[in-house]
Image (cartoon, coloured by chain):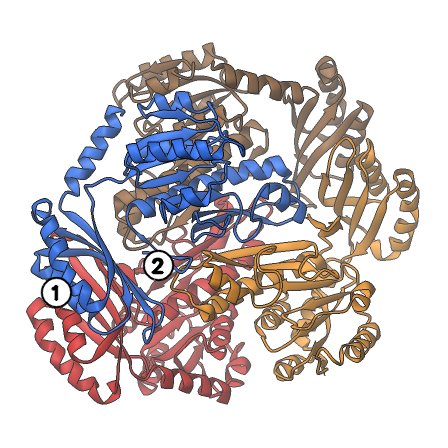
Chain colours: A brown, B red, C orange, D blue
């Protein structure tokens, strides 16, 4: 890896070494916040940021994200997690602690269109995308040079409808070898099989080049042009087995008019795709997203 | 009609009495702009605003809108139209002259939700919607007071699936009696029959409460909530016989997040619907819109 | 007051009768959230919404807003407030409880431009602005009819530079008589004296027709036109004794281009002013705003 | 220069070889459009796009931009220009023809912050910025590698208040040697002297990191933070001798809230700066901008 990026990541880790995040999800009921905040206080933690949401205060599901700082967290980590189990069991929580200095390991999948990849690499180099960018996989050679010049391993795996099983086998082996936590489909133009998706639930982020649910599927810009829309958009979502139907993380749009032909729509669209995907990825890396019933809560 | 509004409209007419608009539409070919601008020059007209667009400079369709000022236009009008026929026939044009002082006559159809009606009335009272607002028709009584207090005739025509033919007969008679040029469906929750639509081609503007083509049909906010979108929108379009498939005039969106329940989406949506419909209506009244193959060119 | 609005406000009060809001502000230190949430739990309250912010986790100021529901709150209110004093004193808090069913009492000041007033009245009639709209004061007669038709007392107090002291005396007496909590300057074109402002700290919301700090002072649209900006905006802020320098609550903009003359800028600006002011007022009414060192925290 | 980019530029030139643009500017008077369009028709040109604007139809200044296609334009060019002189003199026009295949030659000035430079290079590599990117000049070494890796000459010229005259002399010699038409200040943190600016009127585009006229001068993000604004923005403008007072080409903003500290504002701001500068540069390269009395008309 590039030394400059390495130094930035190290400095981030140093700065954040006592920081942790707690994500919670349980049936809404009185006393949750009191119990959790009291617990953190007793561990010596100071709450830096806290967000909560309930689908319904009476019978709903309760969600919470707390970011905290705690002197000597590195040493206490497993202790903190162990101690939390009692509260978690009392309230029937699903929960997870993550620690800011443990960087998530990311793989990017890309095809021929490189604008989303470039944006991610750019943000990563600028220290705005805090992740261990472990490898890039593509079914084309176009981006090899730019990826390898940054010291990131690049794997060229030609893919088409016929060889999908072998391709995915190879990809899954790489993901396992590199211990990948997050897969970013940065305009990767191959459909993943249910087998693949099942192994990475809520860990695959895709960018779709329309404001979903408009223009699900192929060639959205062509269809947007045909329909004569006055806005075009992009949607970042977790991948599920229903094509373009996974939980939406982020969307954005730009105005267009009758003068824009399909090529212009694509050009304008690129800048929306770039920023929408980058935002979604950042929120995932900061553990800001909880998936609930095919929707996302973004704290 | 309210005296204040009447005075505003009169002052508009006085100010614009020498202004006209020319809309053109023909196969693209060399010499169109030269011929048209030379014609206007010879009529003594000064071009105030001119816009053009071609779907393809080689084999496409050419569209043009010119706004011009011409001393003594009132007297010359029919002459100008007559003289233009030669050019029009040379280039095989579809064309129309409209004269700014001849106000379009408008009918508003509305049901129970009054926010779009209120916005239109408000803009009309402020002198920002230049039209002869001839009548309001509703299948509910909710807006009678507000409409009549402005001196606008109000017609209550209860409507449902069963009595549609009689209802539409009555409505069409009113539209004829009042010589209506433009029908605005300001959240009118009844579907119009093909017979009705056929009598007012490109003269009926609807507001749909989603960013079409997402959420065509009923209950779009409920479906937006279910899908977990991060943007909600509204679309103004001409009505055709395909439900929510007519040419789109204007769209806009606002950001929402997981905290917004269906009621919040509706509240946020109201302000988008209001402004999107008002913009579309204004453009129509200013003869800025040309419909071509189920799309709009908005000059 | 209009019966329809009255019924809506009553139904709101009924629905919210057990709801309260707690606003807190103190030096950041460990244990605040734990203590507060434990307190609420012990009062039998369920937290519906909670937001917090710290200017700096080490030496900063901590802010918190909690919305809670508590069976029988009406009866317990004074008790809850009394009991909280111990915690408040431990942490050195500034704090306040407000109860959703106690509507804030609002006065609107307006001059000749009525678009902001209309918007507020419209939102209020739709049940989207939950307040006891007690009176409207104007230095012009233009809005008397629209205000009185809604059953709201209207006071015409001609104002100019010369008679300012007498005018403000009269206004302050009215504000006292009507027990006003919030004063909205809906394009009120008179400057308030320090005496007046001092009596209503953080209780006067103004709408300024530019994106502050650009175009402080008079005639912002004229100056925006002169400068050739490509965006125009509006800013809602609390009034202090420095003209247009008070804490900003909300801002928004719209794009414009070279074609827009001063009149067009004003028209476009109106719709921004309307929505920016309405949002700011709603946030104030929901106790979402904390002022800190000439800035606002909006939860 | 990079072969890929070279090929893209060549293919653009091939595709556009018969295209030209005509910019006009004169006192408004009847017959201009007729004369110009008739002229182009007689040269065998087909109008592809035409825009016009008049500051006032009676006594104003008239502006026009026409993009046209003309078989064999390369050979006819000087002829066309020569023939146009008669019309130009009749109407007292300032005017210029430019030919799409003659690429403008561009220099980028940059300091330590590289995001704007990266965006421009990225757009240029993608074929979305059609220019002959001739050289990059910096007072720091940070971007040497990225610039040289694309085959673009890089000049490191250390600059400070003391050595300004020598530095500018060196810069001006380079601009002359490379025959530069456009200078882009992509976050170049040195002030240019009147001597420098005078040699490149309306040829220097700067990006300022605020929505001007707010926060003219140094440290705009720090001041935006102090003022507590709810929007931050960026402005691209031509450089004149009044700091940050030149004609505005493009502006945009993003929403921020109280949580954003100065560093966050800078991060958010980067993405606005990038896109605002890139749009302004594209419009300049396409001859879409006319400067008139310290304002821009962007066609």
- Give the residue drawn at x 41%, y 87%: B10
Q: Answer above or below: position of C236 versus D135.
A: below
Q: Chain of mark 1?
A: D
The answer to the question of whether label 2 and label 1 lie on touching residues, with beta carbons closer than 8 A, is no
Helix, strand or loop status at disc 1: helix
- Give the residue drawn at x 26%, y 48%: A261
Q: Quadrant of residue A21?
A: top right
- Residue D217, visible in the rendered structure: yes
Q: Is residue D99 left or right of residue B1?
A: left
- Give the residue drawn at x 88%, y 38%: C91
Q: Answer above or below: position of D278 versus C239.
A: above
- Residue D126, visible in the rendered structure: no
Helix, strand or loop status at disc 2: loop
Distance CA(mark 2)–CA(mark 1): 43 Å
Q: Nearer the viewer, residue D79 or C62?
A: D79
Q: Nearer the viewer, residue C96 or A38?
A: C96
Residue at label 1?
D38
């Amino acid at each position: 890896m590039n030394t400059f990026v390495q130094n930035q990541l190290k400095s981030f880790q140093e700065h954040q070494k006592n920081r942790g995040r707690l994500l919670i999800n349980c049936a809404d009921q009185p006393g949750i916040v009191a119990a959790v905040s009291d617990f953190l206080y007793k561990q010596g933690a100071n709450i830096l940021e806290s967000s909560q949401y309930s689908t319904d205060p009476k019978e709903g599901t309760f969600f919470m994200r707390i970011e905290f700082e705690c002197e000597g967290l590195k040493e206490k980590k497993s202790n903190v997690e162990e101690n939390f189990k009692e509260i978690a069991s009392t309230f029937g929580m699903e929960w997870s602690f993550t620690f800011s200095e443990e960087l998530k390991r990311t793989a990017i999948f890309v095809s021929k269109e490189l604008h989303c990849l470039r944006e991610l690499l750019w943000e990563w180099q600028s220290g705005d995308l805090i992740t261990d960018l472990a490898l890039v996989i593509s079914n084309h050679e176009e981006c090899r040079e730019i990826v390898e010049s940054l010291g990131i391993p690049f794997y060229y795996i030609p893919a088409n409808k016929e060889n999908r099983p072998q391709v995915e086998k190879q990809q899954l082996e790489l993901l396992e070898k590199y211990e990948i936590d997050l897969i970013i489909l940065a305009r990767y133009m191959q459909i993943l099989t249910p087998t693949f998706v099942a192994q990475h639930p809520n860990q695959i982020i895709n960018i779709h080049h329309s404001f979903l649910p408009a223009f699900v599927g192929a060639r959205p810009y062509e269809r947007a042009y045909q329909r004569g829309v006055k806005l075009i958009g992009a949607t970042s979502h977790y991948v599920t087995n229903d094509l373009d139907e996974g939980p939406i993380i982020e969307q954005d749009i730009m105005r267009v008019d009758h003068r824009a032909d399909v090529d212009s729509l694509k050009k304008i669209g690129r800048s929306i795709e770039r920023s929408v995907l980058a935002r979604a990825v950042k929120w995932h890396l900061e553990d800001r997203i909880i998936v609930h019933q095919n929707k996302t809560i973004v704290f």
